[in-house]
């Protein structure tokens, strides 16, 4: 088990390092990084001073060593837009995104397990067909379009919900609803497929023969074994959820990491963009390790492999 | 022979693919819609290019549903009085070009890299797989945003970025399939007869992997189209005066409370296209799965 985890962590670590190198050299390959870091209207003196201060006049390998040292020291530069450490901005924005993503993800998993399990109970039945079509539609809908249509309908026309911003419970409904669409849609299909497999297996027949009640068979016997594929897909979807968060935060004006990213890109604040990449990549790295630990907890067979 | 026996005979021989398609109403509708889009794609700019760019301030933000200003205005006019319908048809070309080129590029490059990773030695395989890890362990939208930050947002760059973010799926699937196929007898035979690596991959392994990759391609088409729309919506994808459906939603967003149809119809266009792609890929999955194929082949009371 230790070997298994170590190897997975090593793989993720290599991926993290690869990403850092890619970001570093991609920026330098496409031209003078000063152009990227500074706004377009920066004067020549500002550019020179900036290049000297950040060592852009040095060879790329020297720069890379300095860059790595800074990262290890937790220093990712100053935001050009806000005149504050970029790291500080990112860490300030993350809790909002994590709250949004966490609620959306847990609700999606919870609802998808119920809907998917019921659909798998009678494949081809009325509920199955409705839920399959609806989940496909949910996964196919452009989230930004659903978001603005939702604003138009519920906030502008009916005035039930606020159009945007952070606040009480009513502020959460639309963003969470939009963010849930894709993970929920995809998850229902995964749960359905893996539950169909589990429900036709021998141990479920045994459980039924023993006289175990149907709800227990579905949610205890079958679900436990369908869990592994659910966790795998949930991990992938969690990474994809950041994509959704970018859209939702931009449309609803939530001060999360997605909005920070888009604002920084549009205003060409490269240190902040870079800090977001680093923090996000590290967070995903940690999540992958966590998922591996979860595998071991869920399926004892993995320990022996 | 009775009809039931004839039916049984047909099933044993296997129905042609188009009859299996007709057996599934949703899949038929999806295929017809994609066919319609293909016609728009090929002929749209030719016939509607002019109507899509003609300004007419008298029909600014004209509500949809009236035929008073000609049938081109059936879906209303945009903020500059251009026909929404014509613009949607013309925008289909950019939208579909980007999505199709990106998935095909991802499939070819991912397929080749996957074959190399699966068939050549372990060393190079490891390097390629770690490369896939990097791409897969980072949110595709953020990756695209960063690359488009560094490069100019043009159609070509957008296609490249989207293709890169989709690479890992093709790469992994191909590698997994190749690892299994290369142990089979016909590959051994080809090798024993003196077939080189390139020959074996192209002639013996490639054709077996191709159908799987094509199935993924149909799902991916929807995913890539959504990704492009999101990027264009955020203002870092396609730039005006080029148009895609995603950009049209973004432009319509400013007029949301006065003219909802500006953002609504392009969104519907995206949704219908992605939904069709998803439905069709679902159907393909059922057809290509021997354990599920009977669902479509089983004789029904009304048709057959």
Image: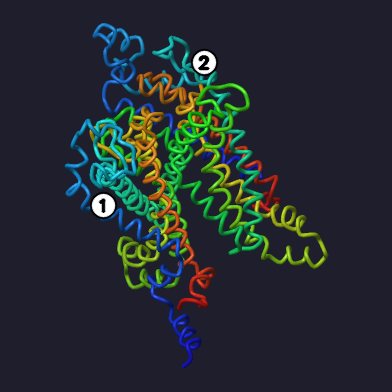
Name the outermost residue toward the right.
Answer: A211
Crowdedness near tag 1: few (<14), some (14–19) or many (≥20) residues, C-alpha within 10 Å: many
| In front of the other: B226 or A76 | B226
The C terminus of chain B lies in quadrant: bottom left
Dot 2: what SS? helix
Q: Is residue B161 left or right of residue A246?
A: left
Q: Residue at x 22, y 30 (%)?
A: B57
Chain of the residue where label 2 is placed in the rendered structure: A
In the figure, residue A192 lies in which quadrant?
bottom right
Q: Residue at x 49, y 76 (%)?
A: B302
Q: Residue at x 43, y 20 (%)?
A: A272
User: Is B233 drawn above or below residue B192 in the view shown?
Assistant: above
Q: Residue at x 43, y 44 (%)?
A: B132
- Residue A219 is situated, as x and y percent measured from the top left of the image, at 72, 53
Label number found at residue A88: 2
Q: Is residue B303 left or right of residue B115?
A: right
- Residue A107 is situated, as x and y percent measured from the top left of the image, at 63, 39
Label number found at residue B40: 1
Q: Is residue A150 left or right of residue A219?
A: left
Q: CA distance from mark 1 to mark 2?
A: 49 Å
Mark 1 or 2: in front is: 1
Q: Is residue B257 left or right of residue A182?
A: left
| In front of the other: A158 or B139 | A158
- Residue B291 is situated, as x and y percent measured from the top left of the image, at 54, 70
Label number found at residue A161: none
């Amino acid at each position: 088990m230790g070997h298994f985890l170590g190897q997975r962590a090593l793989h993720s670590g290599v991926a993290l390092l690869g990403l850092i190198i890619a970001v570093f050299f991609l920026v330098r390959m496409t031209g003078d990084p000063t152009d990227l870091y500074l706004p377009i209207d920066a004067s020549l003196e500002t550019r020179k001073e900036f290049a000297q201060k950040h060592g852009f006049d040095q060879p790329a390998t020297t720069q890379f060593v300095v860059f790595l040292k800074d990262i290890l020291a937790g220093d990712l530069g100053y935001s050009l837009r806000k005149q504050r450490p970029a790291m500080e901005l990112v860490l300030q924005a993350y809790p909002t995104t994590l709250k949004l993503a966490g609620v959306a993800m847990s609700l999606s998993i919870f609802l998808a397990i119920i809907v998917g399990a019921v659909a798998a109970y009678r494949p081809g039945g009325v509920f199955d067909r409705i839920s399959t079509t609806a989940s496909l539609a949910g996964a196919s809908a452009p989230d930004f379009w659903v978001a603005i249509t939702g604003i138009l309908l519920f906030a502008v026309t009916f005035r039930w919900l606020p159009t945007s911003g952070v606040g009480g419970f009513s502020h959460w409904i639309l963003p969470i609803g939009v963010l849930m669409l894709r993970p929920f849609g995809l998850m229902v299909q995964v749960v359905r497929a893996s539950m169909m497999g589990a429900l036709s297996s021998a141990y479920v027949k045994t459980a039924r023969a023993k006289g175990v009640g149907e709800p227990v068979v579905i949610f205890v016997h079958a679900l436990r074994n369908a869990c592994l594929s659910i966790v795998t897909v949930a991990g992938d979807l969690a990474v994809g959820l950041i994509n959704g968060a970018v859209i939702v935060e931009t449309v609803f004006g939530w001060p999360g990491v997605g909005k920070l990213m888009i604002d920084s890109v549009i205003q060409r604040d490269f240190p902040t963009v870079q800090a977001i990449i680093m923090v996000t990549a590290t967070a995903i790295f940690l999540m992958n390790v966590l998922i591996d630990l979860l595998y071991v907890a869920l399926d004892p067979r993995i320990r022996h492999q | 022979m009775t009809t039931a026996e004839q039916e049984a005979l047909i099933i044993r021989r296997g129905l042609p693919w188009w009859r299996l398609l007709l057996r599934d109403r949703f899949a038929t509708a999806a295929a017809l819609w994609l066919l319609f889009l293909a016609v728009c794609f090929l002929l749209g700019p030719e016939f509607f290019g002019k109507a899509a760019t003609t300004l007419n301030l008298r029909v600014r933000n004209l509500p949809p549903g009236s035929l008073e200003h000609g049938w081109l205005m059936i879906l209303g006019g945009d903020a500059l009085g251009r026909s929404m319908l014509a613009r949607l048809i013309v925008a289909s070309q950019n939208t579909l070009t980007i999505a199709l080129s990106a998935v095909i590029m991802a499939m070819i490059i991912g397929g080749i890299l996957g074959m190399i990773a699966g068939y050549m030695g372990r060393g190079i395989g490891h390097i390629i797989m770690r490369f896939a890890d990097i791409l897969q362990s980072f949110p595709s939208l953020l990756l695209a945003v960063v690359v488009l930050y560094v490069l100019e947002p043009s159609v070509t760059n957008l296609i490249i970025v989207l293709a890169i973010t989709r690479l890992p799926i093709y790469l992994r699937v191909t590698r997994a399939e190749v690892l299994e196929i290369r142990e089979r007898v016909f590959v051994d035979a080809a090798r024993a007869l003196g077939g080189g690596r390139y020959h074996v991959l192209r002639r013996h392994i490639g054709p077996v992997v191709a159908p799987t990759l094509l199935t993924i391609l149909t799902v991916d088409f929807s995913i890539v189209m959504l990704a492009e729309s999101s990027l264009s919506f955020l203002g870092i994808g396609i730039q005006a005066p080029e148009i895609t459906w995603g950009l049209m939603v973004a432009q319509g967003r400013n007029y949301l409370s006065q003219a909802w149809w500006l953002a609504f119809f392009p969104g519907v266009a995206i949704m219908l296209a992605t939904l069709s792609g998803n439905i069709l890929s679902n159907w393909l999955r059922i057809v290509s799965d021997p354990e599920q194929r009977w669902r479509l082949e089983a004789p029904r009371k009304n048709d057959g």
